[in-house]
Image: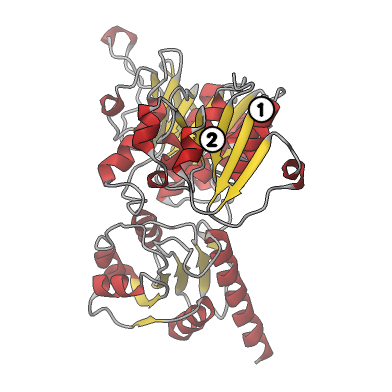
Amino acid sequence: MYTDKQVTVVGMGRSGMAAINLLRKQGAYVLAVDEAPLSLASSNAHDPGVMIRRGPFQESVFLSSQCVVLSPGVPPHKLPLDKLRASHIPVISEIELAASLVTAPIIAVTGTNGKSTVTTLIGEMLTEAGMVTFVGGNLGRPLCEAAVAGFDVVVSEVSSFQLEWIHRFRPHIAVFLNIAPDHLDRHPSFDTYQQAKWRIFENQTERDYAVLPVSFSKERASIRAEVYRFGAEMVVETPAPSSGVNAPNGVFLKGDALVLQKGGLQQKILSLSALPITLPHYVENAMAAAAGAAIAGAPVPVIRKVLSRFTGLPHRMQILPTIRGVTYVDDSKATNVDAVLRALQSQTRPVILIAGGVSKGGNFSPLRDVVGQKARGVVLLGEAADALADCFGDFSPMVRVSSMEEAVQTAAGWARPGDVVLLSPGCASFDMFRDYHHRGMVFQAAAQKLGQDNNVR
């Protein structure tokens, strides 16, 4: 498919490198471009089939290609898109390249929040069921690494940036978790962000499956696949066979239990009390993962086993050791307003909120009321500190700080026994940290030091 073709790969981060490696295995000649002064791995450094160009992008580079693979971290406006279209040179994402060469069925997971958790859960369920499972995509390993023989199934987190540049990408099972404003610093509007997300269903057929919340309308994307639902609102009682009513397929909350309904039959997966995490948004994630895994062939006992042992991913409402009666929670992955809302609404104890970073173009005003209801204090840092302070108005106490260490020390000074110090930034991290993981680790280190200092005293 790519043999002897000249392909330009834009961006030499993790997904770009995976695309380069896959293209070379397919016999393509690769021009790798990146504005940053990055270096290629030694496996490519002396490959005559790979040419490297660093620095500002040059229009001629793109127009001399037969295909352009765009890494998700590179804004599309960096490319001469109009001229590429006029020259009939396709621009594709790394997941489009990968999917054209992956032979195993693909389960793709998208949404504003919860993607990594659901992708991980489905992967664990299918692995526990005995399948050789690839887990990655926007989470960890790039999808291009799945384009080798031997996998029974591929589970991939996919982002709006990746879905924006698909052509034939067709997951056998597509899971859409939720939608809320995000990445508005990159997408022109919330509507265009939604449009990119809904493309996950675009190429599916009647032989495929779509997993949706009960609140979503399948008409929004003209879904042709068989639909499974998840959520608490759907009526799950099985109609009488003579009623002519088809019971919905999916995973639902019935009383205090998660129930799989499939073909008019119900199976209890487990009780809510058996879940290690019972936060409302996590229960939704558990239902979505159970639905996706059940479609792929995981038995209910396996789904139950995985859900009953899964304690969450790092930096997603991760509870740290208590210090002087105060609980510290690392929710550094909360990079949008909706994630912070969910985090605050889940709290039953007073909160000292640490927030801020690089705004992604969202509106902070939905946080105002819930902060007033849940927070005992607010500590702000990063580029968005002033915008957040304007949103919260005369809320007190509220202070701006210059480092995460200062933020933790300030929050600890305000907190009382029984309170929660919650890092839930609502922003990207790149003003002060490498990524959300780095931000979370700095928060954890500051909390740990606080505990050590208290022990010394």
| Quadrant of residue 27 within the rendered picture | top right
Q: CA distance from mark 2 to mark 1?
A: 29 Å
Residue 318 as seen in the image, left or right of residue 448: left
Mark with earlier residue (2, 1): 2
Q: Amino acid at mark 1?
A: Ala
Q: Is residue 231 visible?
A: no
Question: Looking at the image, do the residues carrying marks 2 and 1 touch, with CB atoms under 8 Å apart?
Answer: no
Tell me which residue sits at (74%, 38%) in the image. 47
Q: Give the SS element for disc 2.
A: helix
Identity of the residue furthest to the front in this view: 60
Please state which of residues 355 and 324 is positioned toward the viewer in this rendering.
Answer: 355
**How far from the left and from the top, in percent, is residue 253?**
40, 36
Q: Dot 1: within a 10 Å radius of its alpha carbon, few (fewer than 14), some, or many (20 or more) residues?
A: some
Residue at label 2? Answer: 94
Tell me which residue sits at (26%, 73%) in the image. 392
Please state which of residues 430 and 363 is positioned toward the viewer in this rendering.
Answer: 430
Quarter of the image containing the N terminus? Answer: top right
Q: Dot 2: within a 10 Å radius of its alpha carbon, few (fewer than 14), some, or many (20 or more) residues?
A: many
Q: Is residue 374 visible?
A: yes
- Tell me if residue 392 comes above or below residue 63 in the rendering: below
Residue at label 1? Answer: 129
Identity of the residue furthest to the bottom in this view: 457
| Quadrant of residue 265 within the rendered picture | top left
**How far from the left and from the top, in percent, is residue 289?**
50, 35
Q: Amino acid at mark 2?
A: Glu
Residue 117 as seen in the image, left or right of residue 249: right
